[in-house]
Structure formats: structure tokens, C-alpha cells
């Protein structure tokens, strides 16, 4: 669709298709600024309005083309990727109150959020086209399994509280029969219990009548982080969906693209202005006590011949995987600093490292404590990876797939 010439009228017309938060996102301004435009406090810049025009010129962007539900939603990383291609979320389940706080702050005028999924009757879930679920990974992750073993606890499907949640996903698929689903988990899911766990997962989904494809994808072409995750895509009907259709950018970003810059606007809680330049607050620098402890710990492990311990990196590097335990000491990603101890990433940098925040886009809201924010980003998905998968799934969800004539798609690394 084409928008009126007048910038303010163009924004008013765009509201028919997009929420204010999405308009702000596309124009790269805050929601408040959109209201400023609408109440004539500020004049919209034509260049920013052009971003909106370009977006709405694509027919698939002018309407919600399919509905979806967001299970184990966390802070909505998977949903974010699917909203980009026109998905409308009609149901969310997340039981952690702090994650819900962040989720609601970023998806404000939406439906209520349901808590414990095991207590939700599948019949009460609205009909939907696509089911999204990054079910908890601790029962299957390397770190989670060894921790559970050391505590004498069961892991995998035998972990009665968390291991069985996959079957809640099956229960909902069986009842609602969505056209497609995307499930996400740690790479170790494939090899857990000598492959038996993954076999159960594949067999259960096939038994429900779904055609499934899966692939381990690394996030490094999109974000400067080594993060490998397994993605399982299922379609109710036969389709030509193939993970080779996921377009992988030919880029290898480094941490320079996510670290705070001296010329950016300072943000309360993370950065401050000092002598005309923006710098990270001192509280993110490790104390001598913690830094000495981490170095000693690293040495002890190195002597034993294993590579645990901390990782100190700079703007030219790619980080290790950000994990949910980052808040404890930051040891997996410490940023080197001249003449002082290294520092932790600020939650804003974590948000960028996970691709929630990107240049030009309106930053997401982080309404929780640093400790909760670090946990939430460590648990989340790398959003641009989801976007790429969603884009590849889109024509199959909408039934408009045309095989490319000369296959220019890049193969996955
Ligand atoms: C791996 S995280 C998913 C993160 C999400 N993909 C994102 O991008 O933020 C799993 C989430 O499941 C939630 N969860 C675990 N058990 C649950 C249950 N029984 N009902 C609802 N949510 C649950 C956890 O609180 C956690 O936020």
C-alpha cells in the first residue's frame, strides 16, 4: 500500500496496519516520539517516514498473514522474529514474573499472559497457524546435565519438573493442529542420552502427523557470539521447506558492533558522559577480589587440562555463548579495559549481542534488575537467526512458495 504524502497523515494511515511500537521500530524512534508526531509537538523527518513507506510497500507487511502462539516465551525473542514476517501473537505462556515484566513492557497492548503451561487446557488455547516454543533446555544442556548429575538429580525426560515440558508442546499440537511449528533448544539435545532423547522427540512429532526438518545453526553470521542451537521445524502438510532455504548472511560481526561507543547517547544504569564522551559505568568493572578469584580458578582448570574459566575479549573478537548464569560473575564474556580489570557486558550490550537491539531500531525496554536482565538474555534466542528461519518458513506457511530458478541460497556453515 502507498501512504499519503504528508508525513503525519502517513503515520496515521500506517496505524491501520501496525501497532505504534512497530511503527517506532521501523522508523528507528521511540514510541513517545510517534505520539509527539501525532500531537504535532514534533515534525516527523521525511527520511524516517520513507522507512515506513518502504516497509508497507511489501504486500506481506500490510496485514497479519497468520496467527501464532508463544510458549515458554521468556522475553519474546522467537515471537519478535515471527512478527517481522506478519505473525500475530494470540496466546502467550511464561511463568517467570520477571520475564513477564520485560515481555509486557515490550508487547504492551496485547493479550493476558498465561503462567504454567502444564496447567493450561489445550482446548482453551485459541486456534493458531504457527506454534513457537523454546522449551527449557537445562534438562538437556551440557552444563545442566552435569549439575543435575552432581546433585544426584535426574536429567532429560526423567527430570520430572522440566524434562517433560516437551510433551506439553505435543499435547497442544495434538489438540490444535497448527499449520507449522518452530521448536528451539540447545545443540546438546541431539546427542543427549546417546541420541535417544532426540529420537523420542522426532518420533513423537512424526506420530502427530507432522513433517519435520531440523538443523543446528550457529548465530555467528548475525551476531558476534558463538551460539549454536537446534531448530526443529514441523509442517502439518507436505511442503518443500528445507533448512537450505534459510539465507545466511555472508558476514562475521565482531563485538565492536555491540559494545557501547564513546559517541552514543548515555543510558541510565549502563553508561554516563565523562569529559564529553560516553563511557560504561564503573560498577561493571570486576572488583580486584572477583578478578583474582576468576584468574586463580582459570589457572587451576588450565593445569588440569580443561578449558573452563574466564574469557576476556575485545572489540575485534567474537564472544562465547551468553548463558543464563552470566549474572554470577560474567566469566564467559569479560571485556578487556586499558589499565584496569575487565568488565562485564551491560544488559544493553547483551540485548545487542542477542540481536534484540539493532542499529536504527528503537531499543527494547529493560524494566528489570541487571541480574534478571542478564538471566533473560542468556536464556533467550538470537533474534536475527529466528527472523531468517521465519522468512524461509513464510512462503510455506502462506502456501506461496515458488522454488528459486537458480539456487542462489547460501549453504549453512
Ligand atoms: C529457554 S527459555 C525461552 C526463552 C525465549 N525463547 C526467549 O527468547 O526469551 C524457557 C522459558 O520457559 C519458562 N518456563 C519454564 N517452565 C515453564 C512452565 N511450566 N510454564 C511456562 N513457562 C515455563 C522459563 O521461565 C523460561 O523463561
Image (spheres, rainbow, N blue to C red):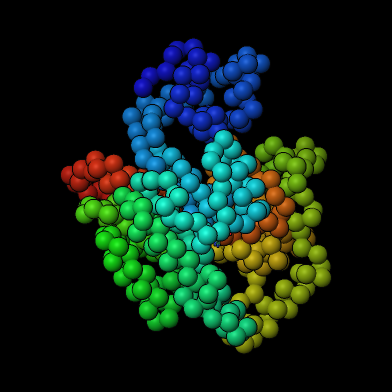
The outermost residue toward the bottom is: 304
Residue 282 drawn at (x, y percent): 79, 53
**Residue drawn at (51%, 62%), measured in percent from left and top?**
118
- In front of the other: 337 or 129: 129
Name the image quarter holding the C terminus: bottom left
User: Taking 142 as reference, is 256 above or below it?
Assistant: above
Q: Quadrant of residue 20?
A: top right
Residue at image location 38% in from the left, 19% down from the top = 2
Q: Nearer the viewer, residue 12 or 330?
A: 12
Q: Residue at x 62, y 23 (%)?
A: 35
How many marks do you count on the picture?
A: 0
x, y (%) of residue 75? 57, 50
Q: Position of residue 402 (x, y in %)?
A: 20, 43
The percent position of residue 332, horizontal first and vertical second, equals 62, 67
Is residue 411 found left or right of 133 in the rendered image? left
Q: Is residue 251 left or right of residue 353?
A: left
Question: Whereabouts is ligand 1, in terms of quadrant?
Answer: bottom right
Judge whether residue 198 can be spotted in this image: yes
Q: Is residue 44 above or below residue 28?
A: above
Is there any visible trace of residue 231 in the rendered image? Answer: no
* Quarter of the figure that contains the N terminus: top left
Q: Where, by quadrant of the figure, is residue 97 drawn?
A: bottom right
Q: Specify whether 240 is left or right of 283.
A: left
Q: Residue at x 40, y 38 (%)?
A: 86
**Direction top: furthest residue:** 6
Amino acid at each position: 500500500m502507498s501512504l499519503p504524502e504528508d508525513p503525519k497523515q502517513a503515520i496515521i494511515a500506517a496505524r491501520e496496519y501496525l501497532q505504534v511500537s512497530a511503527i517506532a521500530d521501523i522508523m528507528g524512534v521511540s514510541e513517545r516520539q510517534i505520539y509527539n508526531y501525532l500531537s504535532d509537538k514534533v515534525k516527523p523527518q521525511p527520511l524516517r517516514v520513507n522507512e515506513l513507506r518502504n516497509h508497507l510497500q511489501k504486500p506481506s507487511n500490510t496485514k497479519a498473514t497468520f496467527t501464532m502462539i508463544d510458549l515458554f516465551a521468556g522475553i519474546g525473542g522467537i515471537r519478535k522474529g515471527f512478527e517481522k514476517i506478519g505473525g500475530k501473537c494470540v496466546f502467550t505462556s511464561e511463568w517467570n514474573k520477571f520475564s513477564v515484566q520485560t515481555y509486557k513492557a515490550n508487547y504492551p497492548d496485547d493479550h493476558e499472559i498465561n503462567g504454567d503451561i502444564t496447567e493450561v487446557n489445550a482446548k482453551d488455547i485459541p486456534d493458531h497457524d504457527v506454534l513457537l516454543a523454546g522449551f527449557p533446555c537445562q534438562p538437556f544442556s551440557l552444563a545442566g546435565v552435569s549439575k543435575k548429575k552432581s546433585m544426584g538429580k535426574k536429567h532429560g525426560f526423567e527430570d520430572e519438573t522440566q524434562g517433560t515440558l516437551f510433551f506439553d508442546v505435543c499435547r497442544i499440537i495434538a489438540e490444535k493442529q497448527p499449520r507449522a511449528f518452530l521448536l528451539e533448544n540447545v545443540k546438546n539435545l541431539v546427542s543427549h542420552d546417546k541420541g535417544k532423547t532426540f529420537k523420542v522427540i522426532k518420533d513423537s512429532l512424526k506420530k502427530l502427523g507432522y513433517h519435520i526438518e531440523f538443523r543446528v545453526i550457529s548465530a555467528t553470521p548475525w551476531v558476534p557470539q558463538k551460539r549454536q542451537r537446534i531448530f526443529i521445524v514441523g509442517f502439518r502438510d507436505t511442503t518443500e521447506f528445507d533448512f537450505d532455504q534459510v539465507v545466511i548472511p555472508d558476514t562475521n560481526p565482531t563485538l565492536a558492533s555491540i559494545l557501547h561507543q564513546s559517541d552514543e547517547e548515555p543510558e541510565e544504569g549502563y553508561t554516563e558522559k565523562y569529559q564529553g564522551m560516553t563511557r560504561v559505568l564503573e560498577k561493571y568493572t570486576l572488583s580486584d577480589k572477583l578478578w583474582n578469584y576468576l584468574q586463580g580458578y582459570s589457572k587451576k582448570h588450565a593445569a588440569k587440562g580443561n578449558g573452563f574459566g574466564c574469557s576476556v575479549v575485545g572489540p575485534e573478537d567474537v564472544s562465547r555463548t551468553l548463558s543464563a548464569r552470566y549474572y554470577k560473575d560474567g566469566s564467559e564474556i569479560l571485556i578487556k579495559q586499558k589499565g584496569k580489570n575487565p568488565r562485564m557486558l551491560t544488559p544493553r550490550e547483551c540485548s545487542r549481542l542477542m540481536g534484540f537491539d539493532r542499529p536504527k531500531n528503537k531499543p527494547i525496554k529493560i524494566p528489570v534488575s541487571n541480574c534478571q536482565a542478564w538471566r533473560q538474555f542468556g536464556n533467550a534466542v538470537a533474534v536475527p537467526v529466528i527472523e531468517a528461519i521465519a522468512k524461509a518458513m513464510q512462503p510455506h506457511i502462506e502456501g506461496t512458495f515458488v522454488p528459486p530458478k537458480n539456487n542462489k541460497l547460501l549453504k549453512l556453515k
